[in-house]
Amino acid sequence: MRQKTSRSTIKEVALAAGVSTQTVSRVINERPDVSPETRKRVQEVIDQLAYRPSAVARSLIRQRSHTLGVVTAGLKYIGPSRILSGIASAVEEAGYSLLLKELSDFDTKEIEPIFEAFISRHVDGIIWAVPEVGDNRTWVKEASLDVEIPLVYLTMQAQENISVVSVDNYLGGKMAVSHLLEQGFKHIGHISGPLDWWEARQRMTAWKDVLNENGIKVKDEHSVEGDWSLSSGIEATKKLLNQYPDVDAIFVANDQMALSAIQYLRQNGRRVPEDIGIVGFDDIPESEFFFPPLTTIQQDQNTVAKLAVEDIIKTIESGWHKLEPKEPQTIIVPPTLVVRQSSLHLRGIHEKEVEIK
């Protein structure tokens, strides 16, 4: 006998079980108002016919798609790619699906078509995972009022009446520079990320503040701007050494530039950490295997992603309504200072991991 290849329907299940389609629906949705005998009979027919409820139909009935829209950009960078990976894992774990939109650049102003496309596909909420660069957040407050589904934003400064999840970049910068001072370094330079990025500005501001608080005057020539890439780390280190010859330590705004800084210093006769201490930011998996192993600020993008997904799903499942929205919240994830050989200037200090208190 030829096996049936077409999709079974709820009507076929009801007919075979001798019950109504409403009864089959109650069994599928585990409603209590079905007798054990009927439930068993219906379930046996469902198994025999290999019936699978239509996710689309169930979504229309419940007015829920169990799908989140995610907007991202800059996946060539470690931060955005890590966050997207974390979002994908958290969404799957929560039993939701993901609909992704990757922007071609950071400063997209035409955001209405993006939201309209998501809403037309009945997503239950939107996670905006695009880094804050330049003025690409000028539309945020207006969007938070106009979009009729929950929204949460990542990697941006806190704003009133908007849900935000972000790493505390400023605290991470303070931890890095304070650690270098504790090691006895006195002339601490900085290689920043591109300063149109909010995260880069936060890290640079922390560097300045800690030095000023410790009576160390900061001058323009004490810092150089990079672009997060390995090649820019080499050029920035070369420039910093030329304009700040007394530098004895460098806080580098990401691990990739820190790696190339270490390489350039070694190639030019400078020992790390004996001559110049180095602290990075990110704690990429490779940083432990640099030579010397890199002291760095660990920012947990997986936690940021998970908290964002949890927050928006909690909002959705609480019965969020445009007229009575859930109170937005700002979630700031603290970083961790991971101490390795590249910054150990004082004798007798061993490699360790220091967690934020």
Image (cartoon, rainbow, N blue to C red):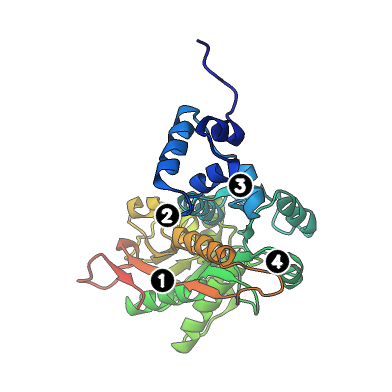
Res 114 seen here: yes
- Residue at (51% x, 83% y) in the render: 209
User: Which residue corresponds to mark 1?
Assistant: 248
Q: Residues within 10 Å of mark 2 (few under 14, many from 20)?
A: some
User: Which residue corresponds to mark 3?
Assistant: 58
Q: Nearer the viewer, residue 301 or 291?
A: 301
Q: Which of pointers 4 and 2 lies earlier in the amino acid sequence?
A: 4
Q: Nearer the viewer, residue 116 or 60?
A: 60
Q: Is residue 148 above or below residue 15?
A: below
Which type of secondary structure does the marked residue at label 1 adopt?
loop
Query: Please, what is the three-letter code of the amino acid marked with disc 2?
Result: Ile
Q: Nearer the viewer, mark 4 or mark 3?
A: 3
Q: Are marks 4 and 2 in contact (CB under 8 Å)?
A: no
Q: Nearer the viewer, mark 1 or mark 4?
A: 4
Q: Residues within 10 Å of mark 3 (few under 14, many from 20)?
A: some
Q: Alpha-carbon distance for marks 3 and 2?
A: 42 Å
Q: Is residue 86 left or right of 164 when viewed as pictured?
A: left
Which type of secondary structure does the marked residue at label 4 adopt?
loop
Q: Which of pointers 1 and 3 lies earlier in the amino acid sequence?
A: 3
User: Which residue corresponds to mark 4?
Assistant: 134
Query: Please, what is the three-letter code of the amino acid marked with disc 1?
Result: Asp
Q: Alpha-carbon distance for marks 4 and 2?
A: 25 Å
In the rendering, at what x and y percent does residue 49 appear?
50, 28
Q: Which of pointers 2 and 1 lies earlier in the amino acid sequence?
A: 1
Q: Which mark is residue 284?
A: 2
Q: Nearer the viewer, mark 2 or mark 1?
A: 2
Query: Please, what is the three-letter code of the amino acid marked with disc 3?
Result: Arg
